[in-house]
Amino acid sequence: MQLYTTSLTEYKRLATKEVKVGDLLLGNFHPIRLQTMTTKDTMDTMGTVEESIRSIEAGAELIRITAPSKKEAENLLVIKNELRKRGYNTPIVADIHFTPNAAEIAARIIEKVRVNPGNYVDKKKFELIDYTDADYAEEIERIQERFTPLVKICKEYGTAMRIGTNHGSLSDRIMSRYGDTPMGMVESAMEFLRIARYENYHNIVLSMKASNPQVMVQAYRLLVKTMQEEFNECYPLHLGVTEAGDGEDGRLKSAVGIGTLLEDGIGDTVRVSLTEDPEFEIPVCRDLVKRYETTPENNTYTFGTVPALPDGKTPYNPLAYKRRETFAVDNIGAKHVPVVIADFSKQTNITPEHLRSIGYTYSETLDKWSISDTAADYIFTGNQIINFALPGTLKVITYPDTWLQATDKTKYFPIFQDSGYVTAEQKSSLLNFVMIDCFNDETSLNDFTYIDNLANDPTVVICLSSTNKNAMQSVRRMFVELQSRHVKNPVILITDSNWTTPDEHHIHYGTETGALLLDGFGDGLCLGMSAASYESASVHSSGRNYNSNQSVEQFINSTAFSILQATRTRISKTEYISCPSCGRTLFDLQETTAKIRSVTNHLKGVKIAIMGCIVNGPGEMADADFGYVGSGPGKITLYKGKEVVKRNVNSDVAVEELINLLKENDAWVDVTAETV
């Protein structure tokens, strides 16, 4: 039996219970639903209505609106009536945090309420308490007493509910027993789910959100496993990476987390939490789910025959991260961070200026190269020999015939097709790349006998890709095969995109490589585009969807490093945990995020949380190093970890105070360039 999904070798939707949200059906193989959340103050009725309409017209199938107190909950009726009067019948979701009374009001008005089990009854004080079993049982009884009235109201009014756990807002009780773990997240939700089931109420969706995609994926998988074992059925799942941020980082972090689960058939509705206007989240949601266009009658797609897992089990633990054990070939594998290979095979006459796009800048005056923290480690040039002196750290991969022509065999290395390597007369004594197309229509496990010929060759780095539609599953199955044959060569993940827009490319790369990296597979990335996609991207590089100063190679290089950052496998830049605006936000979140980015984006490895209000403050920024949190109109509270350092700082000087805090804690460095 699979631990957490129906199949690991093909795409197949996980069977879940059907939930009714107004007239919208969710789960039970219905289409994956798209949703977003408004950013206006809920008491701004017309502003919220207009924002909702823009989101609905962009494709939102559910609209979530914050209701932090009774007055906002009551105003949901006014908002709902105005939307219905204008002909919009999209279900409304009330977002509840600390106030059961607000939830009980909202549940009588709108189609769905969202409660956070970490703070719906508990008040988080960041205290470690040693709970006895009796104390713990007493707390559960208290939760049942406070939560049951809402369950009964929802059951009476036909209102749906989302039990939404957040990694950063687990209660002190859960933290004291389970810690800041996926298990704690799951148990937090299960406590509430058991109470609802006791009342025979099942119109429930669950979520396990975290700003760290690795934690988020493990929590959802564990939740599925737990529901299957305890109830022998699963409730629909709402997928999201909380506080993903904005721009490229927000999209890629969401693609890695949400896409990994969608690839396993997990997920019935998605929300992409971007620090942008809500209607801009919907196209990203649509790009995520359009890869999985199935119907209840046909909820599977497969292209290419991928053999079942041996004994139906995985030789690795998908509920806990552990990097696959490999030996090192040069700087690839073992304990080295994953490398990035830039594909320059579509460029002609490569010059030093081209290398600027992948992190290398040449100064003619100084006759020196400077290297950025996001500089590619290798470039693939196909049939080209570069006719200038390369930076000392950069190495070149070429086809075998071209490699033979290279004079410096310590900088140039060949890449072979799998069977070609076995029969090749001349190979590098240092490093050889060997490509394998995993389980295409013409191959099966029986065709991979040559793997044993290169297995554990100390010069071989294996490059895995697949032309199958279920490419990620095909490559993952090959990793299982390598493990079963005790092959410990390092592996590069090769992924080409046939899509068109930057968002589509981000989602394709993030999903197919991120899913593997989160399982501990992969010692490097090589991302590319089909010829048609590359040409389209080059032609439109000055359009509104592309950075006008960014070449295709720069776009791909930046994407690769962002994926490694999102999977926490290689940290090369500052990480921002930035919540999307909502009606609770106490300052201009987009403007402030951009301002903080502009002065801190050189702080490699530092995690900075930018939170609009105290609800999404110390809790949601679970593993941030520093926090910038709205505490009142025009007021900011600064955190180091979860500890308050400065309260009620005026917002006009708060960014400067954040910089001072970074300096005081030795987290600040001046901008420099490393020369090579």
Image (spheres, rainbow, N blue to C red):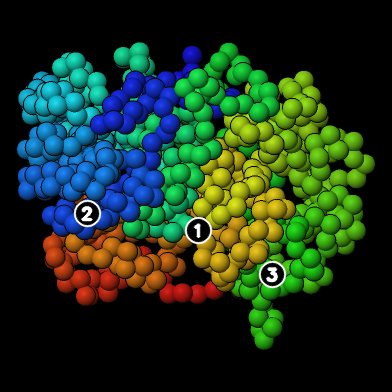
Amino acid type at image mark 3? His
Lower position in the chain sequence, tag 2 or tag 3: 2
> Is label 2 in contact with label 1 (beta carbons under 8 Å)?
no
Binning the other alpha carbons within 10 Å of mark 3 as few (below 14), some (14 to 19) or many (20 upward) gives: some
Amino acid type at image mark 2? Thr
Task: Relative to 255, say whether 360 is above or below.
Answer: below
- Label 1, secondary structure: give it: loop
Residue 209 is situated, as x and y percent measured from the top left of the image, at: 33, 40
Task: Residue under label 2, please give it.
Answer: 48
Task: Residue under label 1, please give it.
Answer: 572
Mark 2 or mark 3, whichever is nearer to me: 2
Along the viewing direction, whichever of 58 and 416 lies nearer the viewer: 58
Q: How far apart are the two marked residues, 2 and 3, measured between alpha carbons? A: 47 Å
Q: Residue furthest bottom?
A: 365
Q: Quadrant of residue 170?
A: top left
Q: Image check: 245 left or right of 148?
A: right
Q: Quadrant of residue 241?
A: top left
Q: How far apart are the two marked residues, 2 and 1, measured between alpha carbons? A: 39 Å
Residue 22 is situated, as x and y percent measured from the top left of the image, at: 25, 31
Q: Quadrant of residue 95?
A: top left
Residue 294 is situated, as x and y percent measured from the top left of the image, at: 51, 28
Q: Residue furthest right?
A: 425
User: Which disc is residue 354 wearing?
Assistant: 3
- Label 3, secondary structure: give it: helix
For residue 366, say whether it is visible. Answer: yes
User: Which disc is residue 655 wearing?
Assistant: none
Q: How far apart are the two marked residues, 3 and 1, measured between alpha carbons? A: 21 Å
Lower position in the chain sequence, tag 3 or tag 1: 3
Q: Look at 19% across and 15% down and name the residue there.
A: 200
Residue 624 is situated, as x and y percent measured from the top left of the image, at: 32, 53
